[in-house]
Image: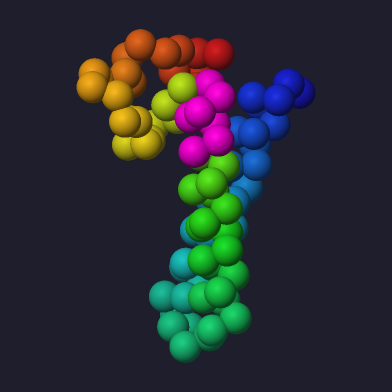
């Protein structure tokens, strides 16, 4: 597994964990430990997505991009690499 694939796997893991905890929080909204865990996984996923975008191009159309042009179509899409 190359570095790009490893980074995508880490992003997927963090997003999955955040999503699963969010589902739990739907029925247990007062669980502060779960809320803290959700925030940690979510924030880590955001950081990893920013790292991916910087190294390999935009991961999604809503990835951070400060250029003056629409770059989504200029880089290979994540599933094309």
Report whether 16 appears left or right of 10.
left
Q: Position of residue 5 (x, y in %)?
A: 66, 26
Tell me if residue 19 comes above or below residue 23 in the rendering.
above
**Is 1 in front, or is 66?**
66
Tell me if residue 76 comes above or below residue 12 in the rendering.
above
Report whether 73 appears left or right of 46.
left
Q: Position of residue 61 (x, y in %)?
A: 32, 30
Question: What residue range appears in magenta?
Answer: 50-56
What is the count of numbered marks? 0
Q: Quadrant of residue 21?
A: bottom right
Q: Position of residue 54 (x, y in %)?
A: 50, 28
The residue at the point 54 percent across, 84 percent down is 32
Q: Quadrant of residue 75?
A: top left
The residue at the point 23 percent across, 22 percent down is 68
**Is 31 in front, or is 48?**
48
Colour scheme of the picture: rainbow
Q: Position of residue 1 (x, y in %)?
A: 76, 23
Secondary structure predominantly adopted by residues drawn in magenta:
helix
Q: Is residue 20 visible?
A: no
In magenta segment, residue 53: yes
Tell me if residue 15 comes above or below residue 76 in the rendering.
below
Q: Is residue 33 visible?
A: yes
Q: Residue lying furthest right in this view?
A: 1
The residue at the point 55 percent across, 13 percent down is 81
In magenta segment, residue 63: no
């Amino acid at each position: 597994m190359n570095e790009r694939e490893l980074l995508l796997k880490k992003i997927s893991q963090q997003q999955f964990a955040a999503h699963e905890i969010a589902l739990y929080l739907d029925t247990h909204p007062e669980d502060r430990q779960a809320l803290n865990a959700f925030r940690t996984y979510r924030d880590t996923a955001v950081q990893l997505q920013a790292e991916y975008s910087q190294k390999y191009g935009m991961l999604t159309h809503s990835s951070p991009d400060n250029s003056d042009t629409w770059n989504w179509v200029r880089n290979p899409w994540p599933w094309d690499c």
